[in-house]
Image: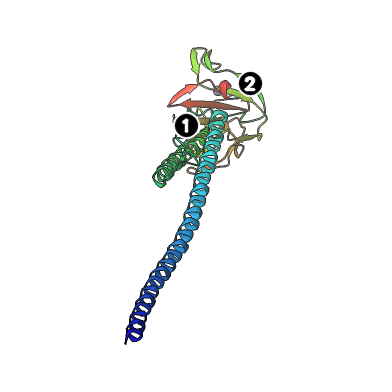
Amino acid sequence: MRSLRIRKTFLGLTLCSLLLGGMLFSFFAWDYVSHRIEFQELQRLRIEASDQRQNMQRLVLDVERLQQELASLAMTEARIRQLANLEDDGRLIPVAMGGQPDEDNFSLNEIQQQINALQIDIELRRQAQQDVRNLLNDQISISRSTPKGWPTRGWLSSYFGKRKSPFTGRTVMHEGLDIAANTGTPVVAPADGIVARVTYSSTYGNKVVIDHGYGYQTLYAHNSRILVKVGQRVTRGERIAQVGNTGVSTGPHLHYEVHLNGVPIDPRAFL
Ligand SMILES: [Zn+2]
């Protein structure tokens, strides 16, 4: 009976130990596995964070590179303005140059701010370059429309200003230059323009007037022939007439006038 009781107690204790052991083992095994999973998750997050950090560093470098490129564009534009004698409109200083994010200590917010500043700067630059293009086009257009050079090959026989009329002897204003040349010598347009008038008058003979725009008009008188029609577009150097002796004239010559805003001015300033 005694040995049986001992064996029963022993058996009970053994069963309890086994049960406890199993429970402990299950607990530690579960704990281990869950820690293992957490550790792997942590590793994955660490790698992800490091990748993101590298991407952000790359972004910061890209932003800096773009800022430098914009700055160099602004300098080129400033040089073009200087060469073309254009006014500096005060938009040449790049706005995105200050406050660059520190490569090791930045936030997405800071990078976003830099990108916003860059976008504003690019838009300003685009507008400024359009202005430069327009101004240059205007300058080219004005230059092409301003009389330049001799309208015919010859020599000056009478100047602009008051003179005694060779016909009446009275002092009158001579509103142009007389360029003596043989009949038939080509007369060329000294600037781009549109033929405004082709007329014959007893004083001026065969006369052509060209409107160049920007307030400039030129007049050619005493021609033997006129080679253009009213409304025709002419370019600098294009033949428009031939020297002659028509109208009131003492010999073959071209009477050449330049008007600015309707007022005759000395054409010698444009030869
Ligand atoms: Zn004259």
Residue 54 seen in the current view: yes
Q: Where is residue 198 shown, x and y percent of the image?
A: 49, 38
Which mark identifies residue 156?
Answer: 2
| Secondary element at image label 1 | loop
Q: Quadrant of residue 249?
A: top right
Dot 1 alpha-carbon crowd within 10 angstroms: few under 14, some 14 to 19, many 20 or more: some
Labels 1 & 2 near each other (Cβ < 8 A): no
Quick one: quadrant of the N terminus? bottom left
Depth check, mark 1 against mark 2: the one in front is 1
- 118 or 133, nearer to the observer: 118
Q: Is residue 103 left or right of residue 250?
A: left
Q: Quadrant of ligand 1?
A: top right
> Visible in this render: residue 199?
no
In the rendered view, does 110 fall on the left or right side of 77?
left
Vertical arrangement, residue 19 with respect to residue 196, above or below = below
Instruction: Kindly report the distance in space between the C-alpha atoms of the residues bearing marks 1 and 2.
Output: 53 Å
What percent of the width, then of the height, locates residue 162?
51, 13
Q: Amino acid at mark 1?
A: Ile
Nearer to the camera, 41 or 202: 41
N-term mark: 1 or 2: 1
Q: What's the amino acid at mark 2?
A: Leu
In the displayed structure, would residue 149 be above or below residue 59?
above
Q: Secondary structure at mark 2?
A: strand
Q: Residues within 10 Å of mark 2 (few under 14, many from 20)?
A: some
Find disc 1 in the rendering and name its residue: 93
In the rendered view, tell whether residue 146 sits above or below residue 130.
Answer: above
Which residue is at a point 62% across and 32% down the rendered structure image? 243
**Residue at 60% across, 39% down:** 238
- Point out which mark residue 41 bears: none
Residue 246 x/y as whole percent: 57, 31
